[in-house]
Image (cartoon, helix red, strand yellow):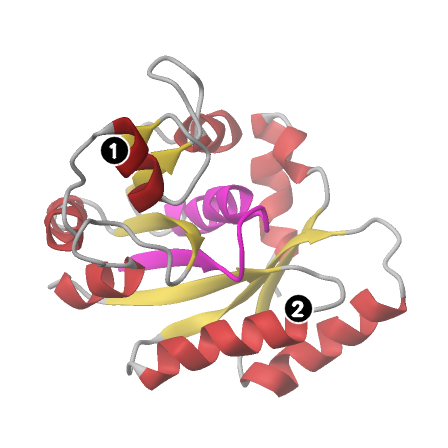
Amino acid sequence: MITIVTGTDTGVGKTVATAALAVRAAVHGKVAVVKPAQTGVGPDDPADLDDVNRLTGITTLYEGVRLRDPLAPTTAARREGVPLPTAEVHAKSVDGLAATHENVIVEGAGGLLVGLDAEGGTLIDLAKALTKPYTFVVVTRSGLGTLNHTGLTVEALRARGLPVEGLIIGSWPEKPGLAEQCNLEDLPATTGLKVLASIPAGAGDYDQETFTKAVPGWFA
């Protein structure tokens, strides 16, 4: 199975959620993790897949393209003069990994409709080009605004007939306030989807042993 991780925005915790999903999937077989487009890093800088490796120990990692500026892939590539692989090319790489791994986790860049290629392709186009079974997971914030952002993202997926497994709250505060507590109840009502997991704030700083042991408790 291919799980495509998207977010309601940038900085919502997609990378840590990707790592948590990879740990969950590893119980059922070999796992590969894919980042089609990584922005905001230099050629030798640590990036999102390095964090996934550090947190999970998973070593089958594939980065499609790396861009210097911390912008949408299309914008960063234009500024850098770098040609982007098409969404279909990314899909072929993901399908290839899915042929040899029971689970492939794909982490998108930013939100669902952020451009991945020069033709205007997005994570949606990557998904539609896949030949192997897939589903989306939406990573969302815990605080004010999340009901609207999450509802819009889920609505965009459903309008295109794309499968969605559920939601992950990317950073759950140690002391949630009224908004967070209400959102935990209201997100399923707003979207019709389960909250699969709530990841504690700061989990991205855990060591590998602590992270992998904690993951099962985050998933309902």
Q: Please name the amino acid that badge 1 sits on.
A: Val
Instruction: Say if residue 35 shows up in the picture.
Output: no
Residue 136 screen position, x and y as percent:
38, 66
Residue 123 sits above or below residue 22 on the image: below
Q: Is residue 77 left or right of residue 109?
A: left
Residue 13 on the magenta segment: yes
The N terminus is located in which quarter?
bottom left
Instruction: Say if residue 185 shows up in the picture.
Output: yes
Residue 146, numbered label: 2
Residue 59 screen position, x and y as percent:
33, 27
Q: Is residue 9 left or right of residue 117?
A: right
Residue 65, numbered label: 1
The structure residue drawn at horizontal position 61% and vertical position 39%, both measured from the top left corner, is 213
Residue 130 sits above or below residue 59 on the image: below
Residue 165 on the magenta segment: no
Instruction: Assign a secondary structure to mark 2.
Output: helix
Instruction: Assign a secondary structure to mark 1.
Output: strand
Q: Please name the amino acid that badge 2 sits on.
A: Thr
Which stretch did the figure color magenta? 1-26
Q: Is residue 99 left or right of residue 109?
A: left
Neighbourhood count class around disc 1 (C-alpha, 10 Å): few under 14, some 14–19, many 20 upward: some
The structure residue drawn at horizontal position 46% and vertical position 76%, both measured from the top left corner, is 154
The structure residue drawn at horizontal position 80% and vertical position 66%, both measured from the top left corner, is 180
The structure residue drawn at horizontal position 40% and vertical position 62%, both measured from the top left corner, is 112
